Amino acid sequence: MSGISIKPDREYLREICSKIEAGKYGIPVFQRDYVWKPEQILDLFDSIAKGYPIGTIMLWQPKEYDPKTKDILTDEVKDEPIPEYYVLDGRQRLTTFFGCVSSREDKQNCFKLSYNLATKSFEYSKKDRKEVLLVSDIYDTFTMLKRLQEIMDSFDEQKSKEYVETARRMNAILQSYETGEIMLNNCTLEEAGVVFSRINSKGTKITKASMLQAISYKGAGGILLSDEIEGILDRLSQYSFDKLSSDDILNCFYRWSSKDFYNAKMNDLEGVDFTTNLSEITDTIIRAVEFLYNDCLVLSSGILPYIKQLVALTWFFKEKKNPAEDEIKELKKWFYYTSYCQTFQNSSLSNVRSVFRRFDDYIKGRKSTAIDYEPIELKDLGDDKFTINSAKANFMMLSIIHHAKKRVPVIMMNYMGYIRMGGKDAANYFPELLADDKTILSNCFYFDGNYTDQELDRFVLNKDMLLSFISGQKEKFVEARNKAIVECEKELLTEQGIVIKEEKQEVS
């Protein structure tokens, strides 16, 4: 980032809009479409009228390439001359202001905002009233003068004078409103994204999918990568994997294309055209998710220990279209081993590279196993601080789900999140798999529900544990259920052929 130039400045909103209309500033194709609702539009103009700040506009001058632009109001992709700067942040605000002050006939109804001279407020007016002017009419000085003449002909002298003064004051506000402007010169989109994420007060990031879309978009009629990724996520909803991020899916794209996603830079991918293989990539990702869902009982992306596991599996199912039974068995063993051992906890580049290269060696037949397995030493759940949604917690949930399938058919299960009963120890958490789980657990813990040992067993519970909890012996409950969950984890690991270290016997 040594050559990047960051220039903070202030500029009239009208000047920025004029530059957009003249093609000097452009809306890049990777920007999301206009999505603001009428209440947001009203809030923006209310802030402008009161002189409140509306945030800084960030502009970017590309260093390596120039993405297509789209029309600020219609979002249609344009083939017009390359602009000097692209709007990196502030697109929704600029489109709102531009749309409402513009007299363009093709603008949406949401931009047909009015200003009521009597109430001195912005509104969406359905009636034709002389004292209610379109914002675009007030903004354009010549049109405003024409409308003011109509007002003077329609109201008495005092009222006319009041309305005329109010209209002129609002015209001056709209014409003179300034906003912050940051210009990023001589930088790549990836560098601009870093600056953007650090400056933006909400920590919003430009996704890798948006960056790559800027590189790969081929013009009118071309494929928008972000739309395709949304389509993939929609298809994954049947497996409850639709909460993955677009960058999670893009990392699967990288790996499918034999790229090291953990070390890939945008300019390395400029020559990569994913669009010609979208169907095959999509099918491969879905196959990987199906394996996780059906074979490993990862019933939601919310309990997937590591996204990197999905990325690796995408590569596996690309290379192994019809894996043998022993390969699926090895894949399950690898998944549970890396989950329990928290193999990806160390996210350093060297560690990730090492794990993936070892996995590749297995896929290419250079190794007989997907990782070098070591005997596992089981850990008590109370050994370290328990954090829900961590890899450790997710493995615990998976082990409980595997245990529950002895009592309930998997086809009836649907992971809906976790239920916490009591404190924040691991023993107090339960996966919510059936619609009545919350009711059953509430009855067990707080209303002395009468359930059989078999009914309690699917929750890794028994009557002694509940008696301890109800009688106030919370530590005894935690100790007993922790021990029972560890047994579930041990059972799951040994089923996969993973060796468990023998506990050392105390010498008497």
Image: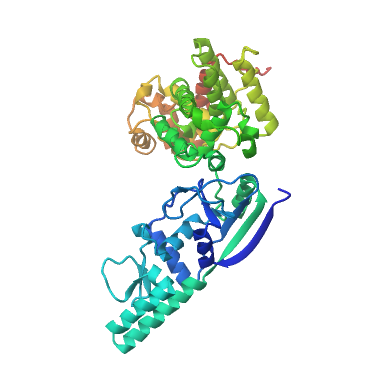
Query: Is residue 265 depicted above or below 14 in this figure?
Result: above
Q: Is residue 50 visible?
A: no
Q: Is residue 443 left or right of residue 181?
A: left
In percent of the image, x 70 and y 30: which residue is there? 350
Where's residue 379, x and y in %?
60, 26
Q: How is the image coloured?
A: rainbow
Q: Which quadrant is the C terminus positioned in?
A: top right
Where's residue 458, x and y in %?
40, 25
Q: Is residue 413 left or right of residue 27?
A: left
Residue that lies at the very extreme toward the right in this rendered image: 2
Where's residue 180, x and y in %?
58, 64
In percent of the image, x 62 and y 58: which residue is there? 183
Specify the quadrant of the image occupied by residue 348. top right
Camera-side residue of 257 and 140: 140
Residue that lies at the very extreme toward the bottom in this rendered image: 157
Q: Is residue 341 left or right of residue 102?
A: right
